[in-house]
Image: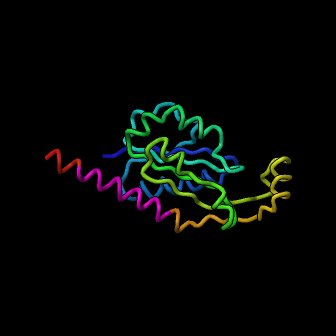
Amino acid sequence: MTRVLVTWSSRHGSTDEIARTIAGVLAERGIEVEERPISDVDTMYPYDAYVVGSAVYMGKWLREARTFLDEHHELLATRPTWLFSSGPLGPDEADEFNGSKLAAAVNAQDHRLFRGRLQRSQLRLGERIVARVVGAPEGDYRDWPVVTAWATAVARTLEEAGSKRTRTAV
């Protein structure tokens, strides 16, 4: 059986909800999943595969998530790994972030950029000022069917890899 770690860095909970949805889809498909924020990951070795995500602010993953990839890039590069990002709000903002360098650094199977959510009431003062200056629209722009479809594709890849291992072992 494949054991997967779904881990993420989130500032205001939107990426957290995306990660937990991905973990739920994997679990529904019979994959053994552990879900935890990056700050709670104490070991990487019991897992066969990884799904790692981060919120995107000012065109970058959160520092905690970038550090995580840097510290574990050698292991991540040798096991099936998927990356996801959350943060752009409008359709034009998706062009401002490109996760291909992150994906290449850990030899990821795929990187997916999901649109995010902005609730001004959750922002710190500095974040509210920046959101106002750049005209960031308040609202929830996450597309749950897209998140679910991506997680289902990850699950299928893991299932196919598992069945190949089983056939080879027999």
Q: Position of residue 114 (x, y in %)?
A: 58, 60
Q: In the figure, residue 75 lies in which quadrant?
A: top left
User: Residue 79's x, y, as percent?
Assistant: 38, 41
Please state the total of marks drawn on the protein image: 0
| Position of 54 relative to 157 (above/below) | above
Residues shaded magenta: 148-164
Secondary structure of the magenta portion, mostly? helix
What is the x, y in percent for residue 145?
52, 68
Residue closer to the observer: 122 or 87: 87
* Camera-side residue of 142 and 77: 77
Q: In the image, what residue occupies the spot 46% across and 53% down?
A: 110
Q: Is residue 163 magenta?
A: yes
In magenta segment, residue 108: no
x 63%, y 46%: residue? 61
Residue at the extreme left: 170
Answer with left or right where residue 38 lies relative to residue 120.
Answer: left
Q: Is residue 74 left or right of residue 65?
A: left
Q: Position of residue 87 (x, y in %)?
A: 66, 56
Q: Is residue 162 left or right of residue 146?
A: left
- Please tell me which residue is depicted at 40% across the width and 44% down the height of the picture: 49
Query: In front: 128, or 16?
Result: 128
Determine which quarter of the picture holds residue 92: bottom right
Identify the residue at horizontal 49%, vertical 41% (top origin): 105
